[in-house]
Amino acid sequence: MRLNDCLKNVKGKFILSYNDCEFVRDLYKNFNINRVQRKHNLVGRCDGKYHRYNELDKKS
């Protein structure tokens, strides 16, 4: 929540990446939010599959 308060006062542009969850979506509802999907870097490829998860990118 402190980061959100700081970002509200940014005069320039920024990109911030968070896990996609309802709390984060609500916290940053006044920002431009884009949902993206990406590979999980720590798990990598396991059992012949890439593990993917959703993430939110917020732009000022």
Image: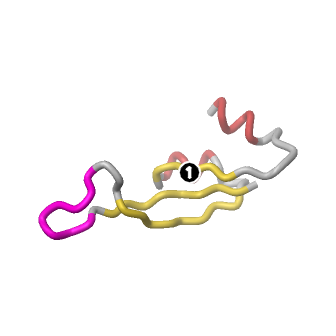
Numbered disc 1: secondary structure: strand
Quadrant location of residue 48? bottom left
Where is residue 23? Give x, y as percent: 51, 46
Q: Quadrant of the C terminus?
A: bottom right
* Residue that appears at 17% across and 61% down: 46
Residue at 70% in and 57% down: 59
User: Horizontally, is 9 left or right of 59 in the view?
Assistant: right
Quadrant that contains the N terminus: top right
Residue ID for mark 1:
17
Tell me the amino acid under the disc marked 1.
Ser
Q: Quadrant of residue 27?
A: top right
* Residue 44 is a magenta residue: yes
The residue positioned farthest toward the right in the image shown: 11
* Left or right placement of residue 17 versus residue 48 in this view: right
41 relative to 56 in the view: left or right: left
- Residue visible at 82% across and 39% down? 9
Most extreme residue toward the top, as rendered?
Answer: 2
Write down the region rendered in magenta: 43-50
Q: Is residue 6 magenta?
A: no
| Residue at the image point whose x is 87% and y is 44% from the top | 11
Crowding at mark 1 (Cα within 10 Å: few <14, some 14-19, many 20+): some
Position above or below: 5 against 36: above
Q: Seen in the image, is 45 located left or right of residue 6?
A: left
In front of the other: 45 or 14: 45
Residue 42 in the image: x percent, y percent? 31, 48
**How far across and down, in percent of the image, does residue 57 sit?**
59, 57
